[in-house]
Image: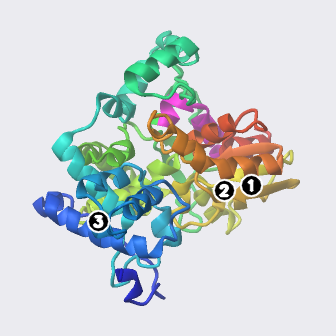
Amino acid sequence: MSQSKKSREGSLEAPTRHPIDWQSPAFYDSAALNQELERVFDICHGCRRCVSLCDAFPTLFDLVDESDTMEVDGVDKADYMKVADQCYLCDLCYMTKCPYVPPHEWNVDFPHLMLRAKAVHFQQAGASWRDLTLTSTDSVGALASIPLLDVTVNAMNANAGFRSLLEKSLGVHHAAPLPKYHSKTLRKRVAPLRQTLSPQEINGTTGKVALFATCYGNYNSPELGEDLFRVYQHNDIHIEMVPREKCCGMPKMELGDLESVARARDFNIPLLARLVDEGFDLIAPIPSCVLMFKQELPLLFPDDAEVAKVRAAFFDPFEYLWLRHREGGLKLDFTQGLGDISYQVACHLRVQNIGLKTRDVLSLVPGTQVHAIERCSGHDGTYAVRTETRDKSVKIARPVVRKVEQQQADHFASDCPMAATHIAHLSAGVDHAEHPISLLRKAYGI
């Protein structure tokens, strides 16, 4: 009998997360890891309520059901990594499905156990050149956004012959939309927009914000920075750029390369902590980057006072606007309604536990109805572009695509540009995806 039939299910206490002891030698002990994987897999096998979330759980259950014993003890431990390979750390199983998360006595944290498995695998076997390249977002972005080279890269990525060659040589699926690169980066776009405004403290916000551009925001979606600046300045919020930055570390964490995460932390956190000391709050345009500073780095570095300081000062952009709105700090001088918005809620936004603040802010616009879709897009940065997982990402996204097409809204938006592009590409009814901050700017008419 599996463990899940021997103990009470669920807990009345709020879920909690334990620090990740990744710097301990015991963390990388393969035998101890396999023992913990077998324990948790047995619980999952007896429960199976996460089967619809991603392909990690169907992969596990197929391994169990096809084994000689039809139990976890019949699964070859060499196949455990097949499960971890399908987990892209969206955290939805932990946050929305699993009844055995801590403080439950079984202490199941499936995503962070998969992270441990990825880290052990990376330490022992490394990663392919493709995966190292795809997760080196800073380096690739800086190179591909060189003037004129950006035009060449974008043209090649749109060429069927080149994409076929890219698939055969690198394992990047020919049908997956790839991000465009812009020589006029976010930093270049917002440089002339800087204004000095008198910050006003409202509802736990200072009214003085530093924007962490992020790799994707800077090189691939630079218009987001411009829209953020315009909206925040319209609401009398002083906003400026973080002086320097490196990737937040999320792509490398999903690869299991925790040493690279630590190096990114060593660069970013002192700069961000200094800004907090100067009275700045912090925001980023991509939910994954916000989550990295609000949750993952504090769990990876639980004793770091500067990490804790940055965590306390980091906000999702719409969370920040909503906090100020609650005490009358958001202007409601909208000039046009937005009609119906089909809005996919990004996983890394959902797991921040701040509620649907993007929906709430956009709903303040007269003549606007926001239809939230709380389902995963299946993108995850690299999962949707790799040849071996592309079809699975499309399957995961299919319910969202169907819902978007049923709603036939005036706009389709997501806080995650990668998820939005993925869904729009798969949908016959969506011409292009928009970002909620761009829609808010349009509503203001600025």
Instruction: Indicate whether residue 230 is drawn in magenta.
Output: yes
Residue at 50% x, 29% y is 173
- Cβ–Cβ below 8 Å for labels 1 and 2? yes
Nearest the camera: 34 or 366?
Answer: 34
In the displayed image of the protein, which residue is found farthest to the left? 25
Residue range of the region highlighted in magenta in the rendering: 216-235
What amino acid type should be assigned to the residue bearing mark 3? Gly
What amino acid type should be assigned to the residue bearing mark 2? Thr
Query: Where does residue 153 sit, x and y in percent of width and height?
Result: 49, 15
* Disc 1 crowd, CA 10 A, few/some/many (<14, 14-19, 20+): many
- Of badges 3 and 1, nearer the viewer stands 3
Indicate the secondary structure of the residue bearing disc 2.
Answer: helix
Residue assigned mark 3? 74
Sooner in the amino-acid sequence: mark 3 or mark 1: 3
Query: Where does residue 107 sit, x and y in percent of width and height?
Result: 33, 77
Query: Where does residue 140 sit, x and y in percent of width and height?
Result: 39, 25
Instruction: Indicate whether residue 118 is drawn in magenta.
Output: no
What amino acid type should be assigned to the residue bearing mark 1? Leu
Residue assigned mark 2? 358
